[in-house]
Image: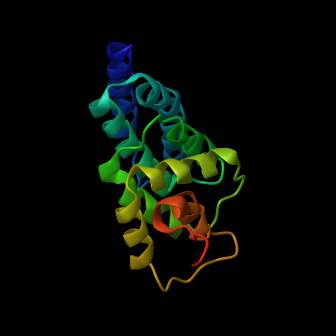
Amino acid sequence: AQVEAEHALQRAEFLLSNVDLSATEEADLLANEDNMARALPLLRVAVEQGCKNTVDAAVELLLLMLRVADALSLPATVQTLAACTEFPQHLAAHAAKLLMLRPAWPGRDESLRRLCHLVARASPVPVVLACLDLVPRHCTKEALGFSWLLEPLADQLARGFKAGD
């Protein structure tokens, strides 16, 4: 399975290397969308079946895709990221900032909540600090609130009250 995951990652990297983020022509934009759409199932294999290094590399590519995802590709990108069994610790703070800075989340579903939980639990203190770095922020009505990342950490960060407190 790990060999298959590594091959899937390599194929996804090849597809994504052909994406031109400066494209303005309709044909080039469609080719970009096609390459990104074809890379997603390959990256899912990498995050579900890969060893730690393969998962890390796949998540890095998915975070880049998350930055440029449009309303149509965003749900599939989120679902693929949420397929991780463990989110890479060293990418959690960066992912938290990307999640909090995205102005809108069309079609948000349970996979987005799962992704937020994975990110938060991967590295709690850096995620909280990443959120604090963003305060104050100009938040849109469609943006995620900090609670999406902080609620999963409440039991770790807040001391429980006992009788007599």
Q: Is residue 102 visible?
A: yes
Say which of 101 and 130 sits in front: 130
The total number of labels drawn is 0
Q: Position of residue 77 (x, y in %)?
A: 55, 43
The quarter of the image holding the N terminus is top left
Q: Residue at x 63, y 52 (%)?
A: 113
Say which of 20 and 2 sits in front: 2
Residue 9's quadrant in the figure?
top left
75 up-or-down from 142: above or below = above
Q: Residue at x 60, y 79 (%)?
A: 139
Q: Residue at x 32, y 14 (%)?
A: 3
Residue 15's quadrant in the figure?
top left
Residue 7's quadrant in the figure?
top left
Q: Position of residue 46 (x, y in %)?
A: 41, 27
Say which of 94 and 147 sits in front: 147
Image-based side of 157 in relation to 56, left or right: right
Say which of 154 and 24 sits in front: 154
The quarter of the image holding the C terminus is bottom right
Q: Position of residue 25 (x, y in %)?
A: 51, 52
Q: Looking at this rendering, what residue extends furthest in the left direction?
A: 53
Task: Identify the coloring.
Answer: rainbow
Q: Looking at this rendering, what residue extends furthest in the front direction?
A: 164
Q: Looking at this rendering, what residue extends furthest in the bottom direction?
A: 136
Q: Residue at x 69, y 46 (%)?
A: 110
Q: Is residue 18 visible?
A: no
Image-based side of 163 in relation to 119, left or right: right
Q: Position of residue 159 (x, y in %)?
A: 50, 69
